[in-house]
Structure formats: structure tokens, C-alpha cells
Image (spheres, rainbow, N blue to C red):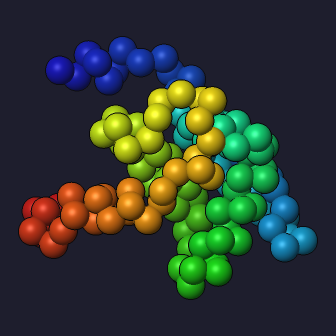
Amino acid sequence: MCRLFIGAEEWLWESRTRSFRVEGAVTSVRLENFYWSALQEIAARDDMTVGQLMTRLHREAIEEGHDIANFTSFLRVCCGRYLALIGTGELSGSLDVPIAGVDAEAILDRERARYREPARSSL
């Protein structure tokens, strides 16, 4: 079983720091290359750069009232959810299908149903 994971290319877990501007302030984020690749894919689907995506995610999370003191963890969860949503068929795996056009509320409702309280208690 572990061979599937330990046999992956080492560059996937090597970290890289990138800087971007949010509301005029420079912010640095350190993530593994695996996550940078996922963010690049997410951004490309809606014709954005990774910097534009990160700025937008940060701004919209703040507008929703989220406390994203650990923005790096937030980004990792975004990447994991993106890949999980493709895996469950909620999102198309095609890079030609923009994420902006999906019915986010319907997907979120179905996702909430999958992660209801009983499942969380086993975490």
C-alpha cells in the first residue's frame, strides 16, 4: 500500500515560497510543489494567474467573514477539496471547464450532506 505514496516524485513534497499582493500588502506563502501545481490548475481553469487566484480567495474569504489567520492551511484545504470534488464527479476534470460557472451552492449542499456531524465525530 505505501509504495503508491512513497514512490511519488520527490519534487511533489519539496516546498517553495511565493509572494503576492493582497490589498497592497505583500504576503508570502510556502507550500509544497504538489499544492502549487493544484493551484496553477485551479487558476488556469478561470484564466487567472496563481497570484490572482490567491488574492481572490483571500478577499472572498474575508468578505464571507472567515478568519484565515493560517492562509497556507486554507490553501491546502482548497486544493484537497478541489481534487476531492473532481474525484466525486462534482467538478469536471477537464481544464476547459471554468470553476466560476458551476453551481457552487448545490455542490456545497451535497458536500455538507457527506460531512454531517456523525462522520466528523470519527475524525
Q: For the point 40% across and 37% down, which residue is it?
A: 86
Q: Which residue sits furthest right? A: 24
**Rendering quarter of residue 97:** top right
Picture coordinates of residue 68, whole percent (x, y): 56, 74
Asked whether residue 82 appears in the rendered view, the answer is yes
Picture coordinates of residue 14, whole percent (x, y): 57, 32
Task: In the rendered view, tell whether residue 92 sits above or below residue 2.
Answer: below
Quarter containing the C terminus = bottom left
Q: Is residue 66 left or right of residue 83?
A: right
Q: Nearer the viewer, residue 85 or 66?
A: 85
Q: Is residue 14 left or right of residue 105?
A: right
Task: In the rendered view, tell whether residue 87 sits above or below residue 101.
Answer: above
Quarter containing the N terminus = top left
Q: Is residue 76 left or right of residue 46?
A: left
Q: For the point 59% across and 50% down, which residue is it?
A: 101
Q: Nearer the viewer, residue 52 or 18?
A: 52
Q: Nearer the viewer, residue 90 or 42?
A: 90
Picture coordinates of residue 11, whole percent (x, y): 56, 23
Picture coordinates of residue 122, whole percent (x, y): 10, 62
Asked whether residue 18 appears in the rendered view, the answer is no
Q: Is residue 88 left or right of residue 73?
A: left
Q: For the point 70% across and 71% down, which residue is it?
A: 59
Task: In the rendered view, tell whether residue 31 sits above or below residue 72.
Answer: above
